[in-house]
């Protein structure tokens, strides 16, 4: 059965797509403001790219993943934010004998700093830098794709983001580089393009970029289109009818829509949702992804204030 597994989609399945004031938008949380909430996500696919060839696999049917992301963003100052998030994930397939997996995945923590904010050619322009990392929260099995919860690697990442707005219309572009540590697996030898006698797997680094454009009123009402691209800087293709492996090349192009809608008469509660689809890929599932949830924003006043 291991010869008939499709490739991992987990990297993209839990990429942040619709959370306001996080690592892919040009918004900042105000000083002493805290925004937190839970976002439900659903991903499925029945086709995947084996290298560049799109195919099906009747031995596993349809892969599906449910997730609940807990997230929080706190404004240390108006220009310096701290963000943390961690998902619970449940993966399964509709056919075959593979056992589904569920549990808590990785904790991600990052800082977001706005180092430029000015008016240029009548547009409000800001430039933001983000730096952070992630690490596994549980001892889940990584070498069990596509059902594993993640890759069990420790990651460091940096992102540069530019946002421009005129009236209520805006555009945002960002690029990110992710450095990934080795992953330890429960076997002492494996084959990539050659035989390797080790329980350590070197994961290639990843480069991503994200472009979004839309309409927003302050940070409360947002509707936007998104294009997202991920490229693994190295790795190798799946062999025909062979199982996927952690260090495979994993590239994907996605397009979608995000929204944030304030809930009337709640003074801080908002609904957030997104829908995305995979346009092209390499060693990835041809996935459709949906998220929906609620976040709440609260202000913490110093004791001397009313």
Image (cartoon, rainbow, N blue to C red):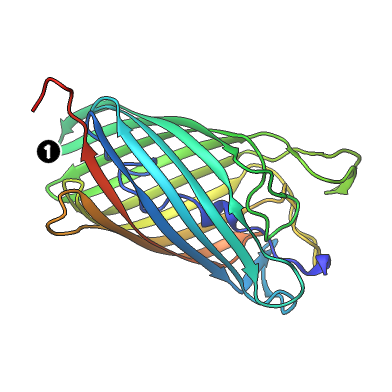
> How far across and how far down the image is residue 136, in percent?
61, 40
Residue in the image at 40% along x and 56% along y: 39
Q: Quadrant of the C terminus?
A: top left
Q: Quadrant of the N terminus?
A: bottom right
Of the pair 93 and 298, the residue shown nearer to us: 298
> Is 120 left, or right, of 284 in this rendering?
left
Q: Secondary structure at mark 1?
A: loop
Of the pair 62 and 32, the residue shown nearer to us: 32
> How far across and how far down the image is residue 129, in percent?
38, 29
> How far across and how far down the image is residue 131, in percent?
45, 29
> How far across and how far down the image is residue 50, in percent?
70, 64
Residue in the image at 53% along x and 36% along y: 177
> Is 304 left, or right, of 204 in this rendering?
left
Residue in the image at 58% along x and 61% along y: 90
| Residue linked to disc 1 | 122
Of the pair 31 and 194, the residue shown nearer to us: 31
Q: Is residue 167 above or below residue 110?
A: below
**Label 1 packing within 10 angstroms: few (<14), some (14-19), many (20+):** few
């Amino acid at each position: 059965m291991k010869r008939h597994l499709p490739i991992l989609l987990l990297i993209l399945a839990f990429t942040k797509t619709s959370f306001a004031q996080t690592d892919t938008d040009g918004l900042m949380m105000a000083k002493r403001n805290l925004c937190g909430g839970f976002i439900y996500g659903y991903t499925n696919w029945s086709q995947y790219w084996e290298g560049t060839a799109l195919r099906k696999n009747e031995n596993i049917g349809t892969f599906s993943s449910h997730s609940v992301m807990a997230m929080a963003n706190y404004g240390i100052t108006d220009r310096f934010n701290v963000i943390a998030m961690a998902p619970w994930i449940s993966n399964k397939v509709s056919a075959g004998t593979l056992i589904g997996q569920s549990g808590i995945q990785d904790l991600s923590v990052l800082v977001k700093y706005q180092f430029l904010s000015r008016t240029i050619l009548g547009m409000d322009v800001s430039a933001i830098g983000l730096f952070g990392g992630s690490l596994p929260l549980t001892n889940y099995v990584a070498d069990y794709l596509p059902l594993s919860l993640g890759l069990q690697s420790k990651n460091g990442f940096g992102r540069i983001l530019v946002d421009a707005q005129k009236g209520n219309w805006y555009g945002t572009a960002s690029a990110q580089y992710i450095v990934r540590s080795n992953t330890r697996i429960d076997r002492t030898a494996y084959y990539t393009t050659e035989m390797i006698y080790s329980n350590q797997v070197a994961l290639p680094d990843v480069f991503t970029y994200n472009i979004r454009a839309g309409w927003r009123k302050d940070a409360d009402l947002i509707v936007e289109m998104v294009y997202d691209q991920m490229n693994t800087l190295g790795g190798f293709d799946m062999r025909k009818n062979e199982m996927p492996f952690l260090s495979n090349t994993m590239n994907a192009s996605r397009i979608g829509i995000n929204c944030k809608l304030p809930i009337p008469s709640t003074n801080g509660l908002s609904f957030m949702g997104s829908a995305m689809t995979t346009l092209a890929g390499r060693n990835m599932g041809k996935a459709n992804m949906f998220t929906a949830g609620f976040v709440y924003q609260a202000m913490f006043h110093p004791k001397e204030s009313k």
